Image: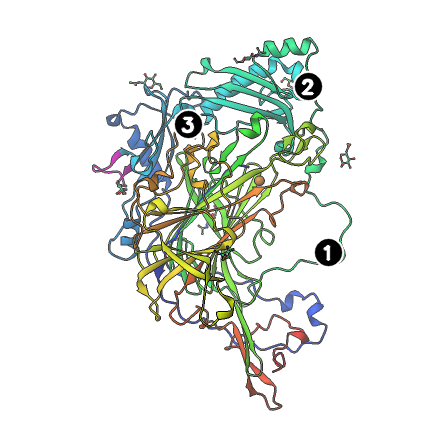
Amino acid sequence: MRLSLLFVAFGLVDGGRTGTTSHSKCTYRDSSPDTIFKRQGSASACPVPQDVTVTAPRGTPFMPLSQPELDSIVEWLGSSGLGLNLSDPSSPTLAMSDNYISHIETLKPNKTDVLDYLRGDSSSVPRYARVMINEGAATVPGVVQYYVGPLPISDTTTMRPLDYFYNGPNGPKVLYSGGLFDAPRQRAVEAIVASTMSGIADITLDLTGLVYYGSTDNRTNSEYFVQNPYSTDGTTGVVWLPWRRFAKAPWDQPSDLYVSFDIAGTDASLYHLRMIVYNLVVYNSTDDLRAAWSAGEITKTPKPTTNDSFLDKDRTGAMRDLEDRFAPTVLNLDGKRYRVDTVNNYLTYMGWSFYTRFDKDVGIQFYDIRFKGESVLVDALVQYAGNNPFQTGTAYSDRFYGIGSEAIRPIPGYDCPYHATYLNATYTSGTSVQTISKAICIFEADIGTPLTRHKVYSDWEQSTKGSKLVVRMISTLGNYDYIWDYGFVVDGSITLDAYASGYVQANYYRPDDAGRWGPRIGETIAGTMHTHVMNFKADFDLVDARNTFVRTGLVVENVTQPWYPERGAFESMRYDVRELATEAEGLLDSPPNGQAMYTVVNKQQLNAWGEPRGYRVVPGVSNVHLPSPRSPFLLRSGQHAKQAFAVSRQHDTEPASTAALSGNVPEAPLVEFWGFFADDEPLQQEDLVVWANLGMHHFVRSEDLPNTLATEAHASLVFAPQNWGSGGENTRDLANAVIFHSDDTDAVGVPVPETNGVDAPACLVLGPDDELLGAYTG
Ligand SMILES: *[C@@H]1O[C@H](CO)[C@@H](O)[C@H](O)[C@H]1NC(C)=O
Ligand SMILES: *[C@@H]1O[C@H](CO)[C@@H](O)[C@H](O)[C@H]1NC(C)=O
Ligand SMILES: *[C@@H]1O[C@H](CO)[C@@H](O)[C@H](O)[C@H]1NC(C)=O
Ligand SMILES: *[C@@H]1O[C@H](CO)[C@@H](O)[C@H](O)[C@H]1NC(C)=O
Ligand SMILES: *[C@@H]1O[C@H](CO)[C@@H](O)[C@H](O)[C@H]1NC(C)=O
Ligand SMILES: *[C@@H]1O[C@H](CO)[C@@H](O)[C@H](O)[C@H]1NC(C)=O
Ligand SMILES: *[C@@H]1O[C@H](CO)[C@@H](O)[C@H](O)[C@H]1NC(C)=O
Ligand SMILES: [Cu+2]
């Protein structure tokens, strides 16, 4: 598993509730006691709910570039006046030492431009492209990013280095050796790997059962993985290749063999073997390995098992009792309660509204969230630890692989409830438009508990249904699938949930490891502990952009109170309320024992009681950060992942906590997150961004096979209203609520339920225990 990034921008703007939803009045069907247990024939089925549409108040400012736009930019970049000396990126003979366009996408627009437009203060958002060029022919080769615009191409269009996005030592440039691992470089690496490994195939076969003659040679039965990071600052290029069986889930078929090459620079003739490691012994050359092997000096370890049935996920074993029955599911029996604009990727739901954006690096993002609100970014990164070159030196940045481009279509009824709404994910990759059909699923779910309920013994009893709209994206990033859920709860809360599943990346099992990095989980494999960290960006604009971050600590101190003269000094609690004054205080840990509350408030927007209106940042499950602050593999590139929370001033020059191409240059990343805090700007009543980490310390166990369980590989966070509503909590207006009053009875004195005219639809056949009348007993 590699590290991932996702991004949700989040700014809360005051938004009125939309009108009440009216429902068809339904009556209970007269049901015989056993009706509920019968499978219903199609004749009595609830209808398939249809999507309900809405038109976004403003056309989305987040359209990806169209193919004609891409073509026009490519043509413009190729025009001789610019002197870029570009080669055709699709050429089969493309060389590392060529200049070529690697990627073009829409530049994420500046916040001020977006807000001006969405508020109607401007008629459009300036449209620019972000262009990534491999400059292999430059004196100092590298990958450089530019912004090109305004679009459409005209006399005023310019191309400028995208330096305002990146605060790293080389600006928008990544020096070549830490740059792309695209076709020209893959070809160069594959050539030296194939020639080296075919020269020692007899030895590798003997030691591991694996041989490699090249990826297309039919004698090959193994594969290598190009471990990240493969550079330090872009000047060096050192890659470790773990060898594994080329079969199902190679991540779980590792051998004890590792080979390292120097792959620095654009000249493949300089690439060379650095070392071979087998059974933790280092050989500096193939000659050294052969000499040791011929002399019988190599102690062999067991070959990776060839029986990989333990990786199968097809059902096996006896059926459990009643498991032939269809599992419970979420259904919208009375029609969908959210509206969607599939052209503008805009949604409304129970007072919420927001736009979504999608891109290659991070996938779905949310903008102008109103319940009140605005937007979020997720960055997932994984740090491995272990005793061999492979696991020690791994720090995947999933943004590098493309969380968005690796999104997959969820399986209806399994990954997402039946009748969910699906949005296509459209983005650009290279110089073409890509669409992942139905990649994002949207559904309303029962949160599983009532939002509020209470019984006042002889007076009244109420219960309010808990519902939320879920926007779900699933990305398969190599061996791992990540599930990201954004939930918009009817009480004004926003929930973030991240889950991981898939094939855990296993280590070769060595008894002498003594379980220090994880238990044995198979014939020849061991689980390897590692940490996943996903960084979310939440740009709060609570009512407006003047916000303050407050830490409310719970302190215990000795007090004396005159009404307790007999106790003397005794321990008691009180609040210790502190505002973050400047960015120097902006890096925050999770408070031990949860003894502090984090809130973002607007001190100029008070509620009816004179309290500042705000939102709380509620740690959920597993708000972990990287255990190692100084691992060389994430030295400066992983600063966003080294504390639980961070609070900085919003700047268009600090759009993201990481960059896709930072992953292989841990000593010279494009974005140095802590640089956001170095200028120590004031934070009180300013435009704030909260950066939060979700993650998992993955303590691997045998239950990670065949696929990791999402029950445990789960991290979450909640943003909840804090003194936000003017009339208490935000659910008083909900009609999906029931209340009984003891004095509101029917003819025989039984309290009658008040359901606000919203009842189970006729197609839902209820059983006798579902009868509301009589449920209140006084
Ligand atoms: C253009 O790039 C090629 C490599 O693709 C290089 O050989 C050539 O010298 C470059 N021309 C100029 C004028 O820089
Ligand atoms: C966005 O804002 C930055 C910082 O003010 C500025 O340098 C940049 O040119 C702006 N980008 C666009 C596309 O206007
Ligand atoms: C492998 O490829 C060679 C050369 O193309 C061919 O002669 C041979 O039959 C192939 N072997 C198998 C097992 O497919
Ligand atoms: C391999 O190279 C390292 C460093 O260059 C050296 O210390 C070591 O002795 C070499 N090993 C062998 C077996 O030659
Ligand atoms: C492979 O392993 C499975 C599970 O241990 C076992 O049931 C099966 O018989 C094995 N297959 C072979 C060919 O050994
Ligand atoms: C989604 O994509 C499919 C196929 O790529 C296309 O047929 C469909 O019209 C798209 N839907 C929307 C709402 O754009
Ligand atoms: C309260 O006083 C007792 C007795 O002096 C001391 O042991 C304890 O640590 C104090 N508690 C706090 C929170 O200071
Ligand atoms: Cu994991």
Disc nearer the start of the sequence (3/2): 3
Q: Is residue 483 above or below residue 230?
A: below
Which SS class for mark 3? loop
Q: Amino acid at mark 2?
A: Leu
Left or right? Give the position of 333 relative to 255.
left
Q: Residue 660's quadrant in the figure?
A: top left
Q: Residue 144's quadrant in the figure?
A: top left
Left or right? Give the position of 147 relative to 718.
left
- Say which residue label 3 marks: 179
Nearer the camera: disc 1 or disc 2 = 2
Report if residue 247 is visible in the image. Answer: yes
Label of residue 207 in the image:
2
Label of residue 521 in the image:
none
> Which of the image's four quarters has the N terminus?
top right
Q: Is residue 301 above or below residue 370?
A: above
Label 1 environment density (alpha carbons within 10 Å; few <14, some 14–19, many ≥20): few
Q: CA distance from mark 3 to mark 2?
A: 34 Å
- Say which residue label 1 marks: 323
- Quick check: is 671 in the magenta stretch? no
Q: CA distance from mark 1 to mark 2?
A: 46 Å
Residue 186 image position (x, y, % from top left): 49, 24
Q: Nearer the viewer, residue 689 or 325?
A: 689
Q: CA distance from mark 3 to mark 1?
A: 51 Å
Label 2 environment density (alpha carbons within 10 Å; few <14, some 14–19, many ≥20): many
Left or right? Give the position of 618 relative to 389.
left
What residue is rendered at 57% in x and 27% in y? 390
Q: Main secondary structure of the magenta part?
A: loop
Which SS class for mark 1? loop
Q: Amino acid at mark 1?
A: Glu
